[in-house]
Image (cartoon, rainbow, N blue to C red):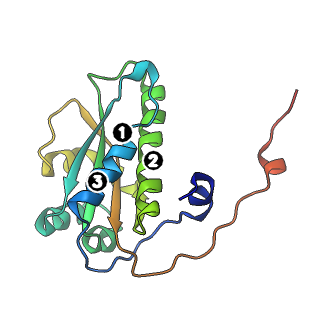
Amino acid sequence: MDVEKAIRERRSVRKYAGEKVSEKEISAILEAARWAPSGLDNQPWRVVIVEDRSKAGELAACTRYSAIVTGAPLLLAVFLDLEASYDRDKDIMAIGAFIQNALLAVHSRGLGAVWLGEILKSKERVREILGVPEGNELMAVVAVGKPAETPQDGTRKPVADILINRF
């Protein structure tokens, strides 16, 4: 899939068919994600793969978007490794790039995903549920699966509306 086409067509998907995401697809998604840029090439991202329905249920209790969490056959909990971190702002941006790569890889395979940030209000509880050692901070949970809905077309502000200045 053409990268610019994927960027324009990707949408958040919040409802999933019951089909499991294959190991091959999971590997391909993580392979694409790990090529995100990071300052000093420190690659500060760490991931927990959640397919277990009881774990998903525990995570669902941590967010008001519980239906998305329980409905997705795959969850990717993305953490910042604080030991690998050298500049918090840059590392959080790198994790954003990691997640965007994952979202584009998901879309290119005909799957759907949504980046969940509201769950961060329960980041310590999520870390405990997933058995993630201290020193890792939750950055997002990404729900992934075969879409059970067709997302609406998106719109964006014109470039002229986002441009502050030009020299």
* Residue where numbered disc 3 is placed: 76
Question: Is 148 or 124 nearer to us in this picture?
Answer: 148
* Residue where numbered disc 2 is placed: 101
Secondary structure category for the residue under label 2 = helix
Q: Which amino acid, by three-letter code, is at mark 2?
A: Asn
x and y percentages locating residue 92 in the rendered image: 43, 34
Look at 18% across and 68% down and name the residue there: 57
Look at 34% across and 71% down and name the residue there: 68
Between disc 3 and disc 1, the foreground one is 1
- Does residue 27 appear anywhere in the picture? yes
* Residue where numbered disc 1 is placed: 34
Neighbour tally class for label 3: few under 14, some 14-19, many 20 plus, Cα within 10 Å? many
- Does residue 122 appear anywhere in the picture? no
x and y percentages locating residue 88 in the rendered image: 42, 26
> Seen in the image, is 100 located left or right of residue 159?
left
Neighbour tally class for label 1: few under 14, some 14-19, many 20 plus, Cα within 10 Å? some
Q: Is residue 31 above or below residue 20?
A: above
> Which tag, 3 or 1, sits closer to the chain's start?
1
Q: Are marks 1 and 2 in contact (CB under 8 Å)?
A: yes
